[in-house]
């Protein structure tokens, strides 16, 4: 719920592609594969043709970023997604179910990218002479890294993890053609008076692919981080004041924080 939380606090602005004229942007590719598959079905690649045409029309240079192998921490989350996909596949193949249920399942499966989709897209980008990179793990982390090292000015994505990973500017599609919503990391930190570490701790407390706590949304998490600064101090407080409280094993907050702050360590190493 990070997006609605930031919009509630007016940490967004409307921009146009012209904003990025003569500049390089990173594109969180898997997000758009899902988006174009959902919107255009068999003609999903046309979505990328249109996007690339728009970039070129406004003299914007994209770097398309693909996911690499997932980090081990995401095992539980990926297992849940696989289970969901297998459940839909069973429903699609189950002749005993009502027709509309099977169609619904087929529609879901049609919107899930396969390795073939990504192979076709890479071939298309090569043919068009467009640069693309394969991340060493999460694509949005690699996109954020590109902005941290000033190799791109913004990340085009719908995934707010981009900001948590340290992406300087996140650009999301809006409901108005040609217009986008931009979220600047500096605005987030200034608005709440947080360091990047505190922002990461806030987001991990809200919940992520690396686990979550029950009954912790953005409002409560903000209150706790404003008071205690980090997740560990919050958990210690809850253990002292809430009889029987125990954080679930799958809430791997230390590892999650390490993942999200990795770019800061890289920058410090670069300075040395």
Image (cartoon, grey):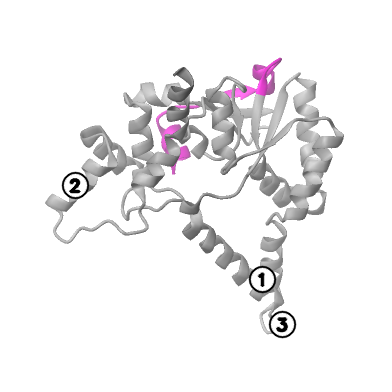
Q: Position of residue 108 (x, y in %)?
A: 66, 61
The residue labelled by disc 2 is 236
Residue 26 x %, y %: 64, 29
Q: Are marks 3 and 2 in contact (CB under 8 Å)?
A: no
Residue sitting at 35 percent across and 54 percent down?
Answer: 251
Mark 1, secondary structure of its residue: helix
Which secondary structure lies at badge 2? helix
Quick one: SS at disc 3?
A: loop
Q: CA distance from mark 3 to mark 1?
A: 12 Å
Left or right: 24 as drawn, with respect to 54 = left
**Does the segment drawn in magenta span residue 18?**
yes
Q: CA distance from mark 1 to mark 2?
A: 43 Å
Comes first in the chain, label 1 or label 2: 1
Label whose residue precedes the other's in the sequence (3 or 1): 1
Task: Please name the residue shown 67% across and 17% down the image.
Answer: 23
Image quadrant in which the N terminus is located:
top left
- The range drawn in magenta is 1-24
User: Which residue is under mark 3?
Assistant: 95
Q: Which mark is residue 89?
A: 1
């Amino acid at each position: 719920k990070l997006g609605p939380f930031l919009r509630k606090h007016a940490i967004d602005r409307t921009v146009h592609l012209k904003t990025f004229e003569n500049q390089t942007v990173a594109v969180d590719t898997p997000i758009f594969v899902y988006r174009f598959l959902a919107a255009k079905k068999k003609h999903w690649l046309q979505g990328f043709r249109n996007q690339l045409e728009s970039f070129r029309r406004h003299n914007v240079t994209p770097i398309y970023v693909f996911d690499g192998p997932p980090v081990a921490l995401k095992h539980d989350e990926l297992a849940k997604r696989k289970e969901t996909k297998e459940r839909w596949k069973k429903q699609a193949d189950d002749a005993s179910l009502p027709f509309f249920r099977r169609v619904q399942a087929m529609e879901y499966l049609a919107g899930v990218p396969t390795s073939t989709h990504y192979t076709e897209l890479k071939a298309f980008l090569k043919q068009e002479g467009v640069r693309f990179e394969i991340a060493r793990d999460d694509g949005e982390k690699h996109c954020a890294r590109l902005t941290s090292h000033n190799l791109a000015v913004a990340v085009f994505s719908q995934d707010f993890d981009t900001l948590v990973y340290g992406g300087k500017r996140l650009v999301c599609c809006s409901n108005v053609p040609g217009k986008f919503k931009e979220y600047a990391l500096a605005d987030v930190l200034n608005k709440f008076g947080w360091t990047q570490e505190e922002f990461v701790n806030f987001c991990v407390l809200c919940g992520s692919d690396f686990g979550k706590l029950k009954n912790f949304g953005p409002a409560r998490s903000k209150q706790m981080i404003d008071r205690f600064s980090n997740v560990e101090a919050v958990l210690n407080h809850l253990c002292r004041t809430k009889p029987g409280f125990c954080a679930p094993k799958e809430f791997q907050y230390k590892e999650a924080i390490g993942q999200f702050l990795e770019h800061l360590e890289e920058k410090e190493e670069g300075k040395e």
